[in-house]
Amino acid sequence: MLGIINIVWKNEAEIRALNKQYRDKDYATDILTFPYETTYDDADVVIGEIFICDTILKEKHATTEDLYAMILTHGLIHMMGYDHETEEEADIMSSLEEQMLAAIHYIT
């Protein structure tokens, strides 16, 4: 699939509002991913957006080293249609994250 993915930084209040509006979860989170339905195979079409909150990201993770590689990989996997609402889904996502990070030679 070709296309543009917008990456947008939000503060805690903004990402909490988005989380409440679109997921009915009333708390701030480190990342939200919104894939868009598209039938276009065009590099100039926006196929989704990833919203990141630095404050929450840094609170949830012990180290800031390579956080962006990790969180963007996580967002891209969501963009591909995966989720982690159940333990089984979380295991699948975790495995995919490890594979993708290994493919770019990121050592976890």
Image (spheres, helix red, strand yellow):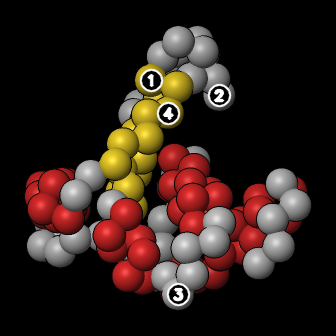
Instruction: Tell which circle, 1 or 2, labels the residue nearer the N-terminal end.
Output: 2
| Residue 46 disc label | 1
| Residue 1 disc label | 2
Q: Dot 4: few (<14), some (14–19), or many (≥20) neighbours within 10 Å?
A: some
Q: What SS does tag 2 mark? A: loop
| Closer to the camera in the image, 69 or 36 | 69
Q: Amino acid at mark 2?
A: Met
Q: Is residue 101 left or right of residue 40?
A: right
Q: What residue is disc 3 on?
A: 62
x, y percentage for residue 92?
A: 65, 73
| Closer to the camera in the image, 20 or 101 | 101
The quadrant of the rendering that contains the N terminus is: top right
**Labelled pair 4, 1 in contact (Cβ < 8 Å):** yes
| Closer to the camera in the image, 52 or 21 | 52
How far apart are the alpha carbons under marks 4 and 1?
A: 6 Å
Q: Amino acid at mark 4?
A: Ile
- Can you tell which quarter of the image residue 100 is in? bottom right
x, y percentage for residue 107?
A: 83, 73
Instruction: Tell which circle, 3 or 2, labels the residue nearer the N-terminal end.
Output: 2
